[in-house]
Image (tube, grey):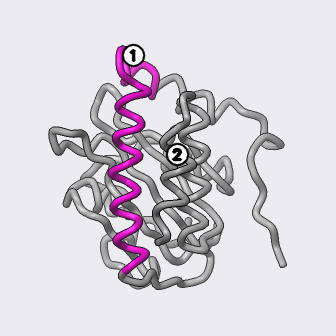
């Protein structure tokens, strides 16, 4: 099954930063996407990017903090508490405020899965974005949701005893302070 190799890489990780990197790389690869991010809730309940792959500084600034009321894929997923797949952001009515931005990046398809606490609260989001439309199979959608659940458990373990909201704020700010050469670049073929 698709999920087992991913879980075998994630579960033994003991470092929070490494867990985020492993999770995002595997999640993006699962869907054949080029970009992705992981967001966690800050003090104010807004989702903040704490890990990214293949995105630009402009992307980090645009989606630095996302409200569940926004029309972004992660906002829609947070609001509904379920996985959201947008096959073409140019056609999604709720995504309309971000269409011009998505065309510049570019990305067309987005899959966002909520990270839910053991109590069932949405504490974050993991998303994969692709410049080309993609259509996850039913098996890939199941694997994505199950993986998001496993990632939420790993993050709960690694964040235990920390002031999570303070960590989220600091990590989000550090992503924006990083120099551009530290960000992965999209390979153009």
Vertical relation: 3 (above or below) 93: above
The span picked out in magenta is: 139-168
Please tell me whether the stretch drawn in magenta is mainly helix, strand or loop: helix
Under circle 2, the secondary element is helix
Q: Which mark is residue 10?
A: 2
Vertical relation: 103 (above or below) 67: below
Name the residue: 40% across, 25% down: 159
Q: Position of residue 88 (x, y in %)?
A: 46, 82
Q: In this rendered view, identify the residue nearer to me: 133 or 4.
A: 4
State which quarter of the image contains the C terminus. Answer: bottom right
Q: Is residue 115 left or right of residue 26?
A: left
Residue 68 belongs to magenta span: no
Name the residue: 75% across, 51% down: 184
Q: Position of residue 125 (x, y in %)?
A: 38, 50
Q: Residues within 10 Å of mark 1 (few under 14, many from 20)?
A: few
Nearer the observer: mark 1 or 2; the answer is: 2
Q: Which mark is residue 162?
A: 1
Q: Is residue 169 left or right of residue 156?
A: right
Q: Residues within 10 Å of mark 2 (few under 14, many from 20)?
A: many
Q: In terms of sequence position, does the residue under pointer 1 or pointer 2 come before the other?
A: 2
Residue 149 belongs to magenta span: yes
């Amino acid at each position: 099954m698709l999920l087992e190799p991913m879980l075998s890489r994630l579960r033994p990780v003991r470092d929070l930063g490494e867990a985020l990197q492993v999770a995002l790389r595997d999640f993006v690869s699962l869907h054949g996407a080029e970009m992705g991010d992981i967001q966690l809730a800050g003090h104010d309940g807004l989702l903040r990017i704490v890990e990214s792959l293949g995105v630009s500084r402009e992307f980090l600034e645009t989606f630095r903090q996302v409200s569940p009321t926004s029309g972004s894929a992660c906002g829609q997923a947070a609001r509904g508490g379920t996985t959201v797949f947008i096959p073409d952001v140019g056609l999604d009515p709720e995504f309309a405020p971000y269409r011009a931005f998505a065309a510049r990046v570019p990305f067309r398809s987005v899959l966002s899965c909520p990270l839910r606490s053991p109590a069932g609260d949405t504490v974050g989001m993991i998303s994969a974005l692709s410049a080309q439309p993609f259509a996850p199979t039913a098996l890939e959608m199941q694997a994505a949701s199950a993986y998001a659940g496993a990632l939420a458990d790993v993050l709960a373990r690694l964040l235990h005893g920390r002031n999570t909201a303070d960590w989220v704020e600091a990590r989000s700010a550090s992503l924006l302070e990083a120099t551009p050469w530290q960000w992965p670049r999209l390979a153009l073929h």
